[in-house]
Amino acid sequence: MKIGRDEVERIAQLAHLELTSEELGRLGTELSSILSHVEVLASVDTSGVAETFHPLEYGGPTREDEPRPSLGAEEATRGAPGGAAGAFLVPRIIG
Amino acid sequence: MSASGHEWSTLLATADALRAGSLRARALAETALARARRVDETLGAFISLRGDEFLAEADDVDRRRAAGEPLGPLAGIPVVLKDNILTRGHRTTAASRILEGFVPPYDATVVARLRGAGALVLGKTNLDEFAMGSSTENSAFGPSRNPWDAQRVPGGSSGGSCVAVATGVTAGALGSDTGGSIRLPAGFCGTVGMKPTYGRVSRYGLIAFGSSLDQIGPITRSVEDAAVLLGVIAGHDPCDSTSSAEPVADYLAESRKDPAGLRVGVPREWLGVEGMDAEVLTAVRGAIEAASRVGMQVQEVSLPHAQFAIPTYYIVATAEASANLARYDGVRYGLRVPEPDLQSQYRSTRSRGFGAEVKRRIMLGTYVLSSGYYDAYYAQAARVRTLVRRDFTNVFRDVDLLIAPTAPFPAFRIGEKSDDPLAMYLSDVFTTTMNLAGVPALSLPCGFSRSGLPIGCQIIGPDFAEGTIFRAARALEESFGLADRHPIVA
């Protein structure tokens, strides 16, 4: 499996990463090599086999959906970059 | 007992000495802090240490003990935590620049439980960035080094925690294990390390890497200590819906039971792996013989899909990582690289904040989840994962436990695999399988190479059989007689 430069760029876009020209080249080679290694999975007969997305076979316990104390907005946002108490500041989105 | 000369005591013996009053928490804390600084200088085990606060907490334990107040079972015992476990009011980095300046507003459940038992957090240990790596070389704060040979890696990603325990800074540490990140460094550093059953320990407050694989577990110098630490951190947590309500056994009592009669399987696929070091093979064969000697019934078994574990793991883990790491966008915490518009700010922040291995895994994970590739890669890996788990269900009808190598080779040289991601991934050939299946596994030292490097073996059990694992491991530990062998600390 060969991943070309355009493909690496497309994935980077999806992942919100900006790659340097050197990174684009290197990642193309590395991803191609890793994908060649994982291609063996295609040869495994999985007809009729369900997917496992999670190793738990037992259902997770549930609880009543009752309000409980939690971090307040002030404390939850204290470490946020940009520093607005009680809120997260982002660049203007709508003109 | 004085605090100096105490560095190799077990957690249990130290707790006894503290309770008896022959050792003061303050003296122990001072010794541990000084040793941590020394070890950090030569081996780079820590990202941050708690100084005055830690000593004040030790004073508090001494004062409360003198006043006859009730104290927890670990009162005054120093512990260290992998720096992807949140500590309220104390910076947590995941060894990444992207969490620059982040101070968690809450404790992870495991930290709250340790503190509730009286343990004192001495510091936060080095790791591969976001726990992605097998060597602790991928840290934004520089690599950690192996205490038995400083030119070699300690293994990863919980390398710093294993170095701290192996060098006698503390008797106990916590790490996290997504594909072997506790067991591999435990094997390379000559410590005990356990990945519990998925769901046994709460993940609340663990910085997520692969959410269906991650588990927090204990790192210690003795099996009994691992049993004690797991007993403290295990159990259901309402803050983690994947944590199990299965009752927590008395693991210490379990570890002391006679292992005679336990049926132990040796997966034949794992002793014939290509690239396996001859000395590792000899040490693991020795461990299998020791299991027979202490009365366990050994038989050969088969895990036919184990050969697919590495490719399956690197699809599942990177897919989950790419989703989990989407949250680091410069908006709510950590690093922000300001840009005039939001999209550019996301991209600049993430590109500047993540290291090379993290970017590689995000890219791979994004690719296997992307439109047109999802079914061929991710969905197929999820189906093979079912077959991997089914292998374990099948063998555990015939045996109680499995025994296997921890890694195909002892600790490798720093830089040796840095330029070849695939070679690095293959270090985990014996460990990722259990994360995919969810079953518990413990690594313990079973020998040394001629050049003096530790070699580890794994004891693996079915879901929630940690007690049985400890029982076999404690007997094997005794028969190996390696407990008094320690690295020289400069």
Image: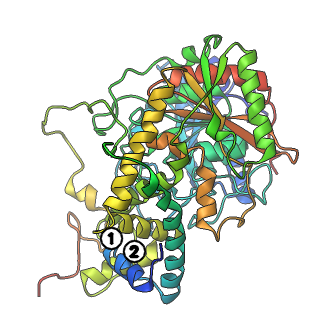
Query: How far across and down, in percent of the image, does residue B113 sit?
Result: 43, 33
Query: How far across and down, in percent of the image, does residue B466 sit?
Result: 51, 25
Q: Residue at the spot x=44%, y=50% of the render?
A: A44
Mark 2 — on which chain does it sit? B
| Residue beneath disc 2 | B350
Q: Amino acid at mark 2?
A: Arg
Res B52 seen here: yes
Please tell me whether mark 2 sits on a helix, a strand or a loop: helix
Q: Residue at the spot x=35%, y=48% of the render?
A: B106
Q: Quadrant of residue B246?
A: top left
Alpha-carbon span between mark 2 and mark 1? 6 Å
The answer as to whether the residues below labels 2 and 1 share one chain is yes
Q: Residue at the spot x=56%, y=14% of the render?
A: B253
Q: Amino acid at mark 1?
A: Asp
In front of the other: B70 or B181: B181
Q: Relative to B65, does residue B313 appear above or below in the rendering?
A: below
Query: How far across and down, in percent of the image, does residue B73 sit?
Result: 52, 23
* Mark 2 surroundings within 10 Å by alpha-carbon count, few (fewer than 14), some (14 through 19), many (20 or more): many
Query: Do the residues bearing badges 2 and 1 touch, measured as CB atoms within 8 Å?
Result: yes
* Mark 1 surroundings within 10 Å by alpha-carbon count, few (fewer than 14), some (14 through 19), many (20 or more): many
| Residue beneath disc 1 | B329
In front of the other: B346 or B368: B368
